[in-house]
Image (cartoon, grey):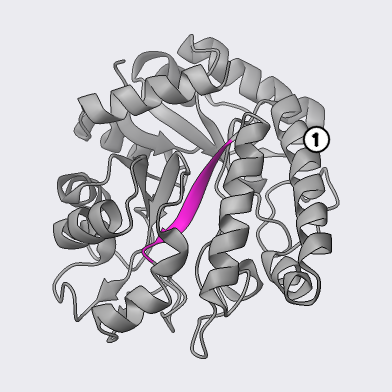
Amino acid sequence: MKKKAIIISIKGYSLSINEKNLLAKERPWGLILFKRNIKSVRQVKQLIKKIRKLTKDSKFPIMIDEEGSSVSRLKEIINHNFSQKSLGDIYKINKEVSLFFYKDYINNLTNFLKKIGININTVPVLDVLRKNTNKIIGNRSFSNDPNIVKKLGQICVKQYELNKLATVIKHVPGHGCASLDSHLKMPKVKLNYRDLNKIDFLPFKSNQSKFAMTAHILYEKIDKKNVATFSKKIISNIIRKKLGFKGILISDDISMKALKYDLVTNAKKSLLAGCNIVLYCAGNYKDTYKLIKEVPFIDKFTAKKTSEFYKFLR
């Protein structure tokens, strides 16, 4: 399976001539949609259909970031006020009611996502709420209890898979301990491995999601030089070995300000550290073209896992 190790994004509601040519010729691994790409059900269905026609791939990965509440890319076409935090709060009071509601919610949402052509949703957020957690996570987290976060995360992944949609657990190995927003600055965490392992890392352990997304965070007591996305030590020793993640590892957006290099260097450092695919969300065509020319084709592991994902979609 010959695909470039990058997930790209586009600028607007329809494809430009340049974007059409890029999709037809350059073979990106997948594409992520944002609110700027969605104005109606009919429009987004036509857009996705066009993308798959250009790539000559009926299962071409189309992702969306549809968490609900503060992070909803579909606000223009569905009423979606759900937040993971509200579910976690209900779970503390009544587990059965919480799980019944969550599974029903996922069934309805996945049916809609499949209807418009999306096959990956970047949920669940498995970051644990802490006293100093930045508001960028906030109600996107299930709870301040890592065991509740882990349980609801496992339910989410399983229910999505029953509905033949894939998930992306994030932000591995944990963003809840960070007080800064990695979209704007590099968060630095001073906690040691023992403290992180008991709380922040716990929800990610043995989760069976097909995909995971890294955190652009500097865990100073583990790797004082590299954010997790750039850290061989964190990806190999913690994400792969300690947490047991066996799927495709995707970087968070390489245009975020937590990463201090140019886009091409950010991409190369992510892949060199052990990310399987890089994510670029800004939708700038010139940068997209430059990146897709510079990133390599996916390796054998990623090709194998991608083939398994395609079979799963059948």
Image quadrant where one finds the N terminus: top left
What amino acid type should be assigned to the residue bearing mark 1? Ser
Q: In the rendered image, is residue 65 in sight?
A: no
Q: Residue furthest bottom?
A: 131
Q: Position of residue 256 (x, y in %)?
A: 38, 61
Q: Is residue 239 above or below residue 88?
A: above
Displayed quadrant of residue 288: top left
Q: Residue at x 50, y 28 (%)?
A: 61
Give the side of residue 124 with respect to residue 81, left or right.
Answer: left
Q: In the image, residue 189 lies at what x, y percent?
A: 31, 82
Compared across the picture, whether 148 is left or right of 222 comes to right
Residue 4 falls inside the magenta stretch: no
**Residue 35 screen position, x and y as percent:** 66, 47
Disc 1: which residue: 40
- The image shows residue 15 at horizontal and vertical percentages of 57, 26
What residue range appears in magenta? Answer: 166-173
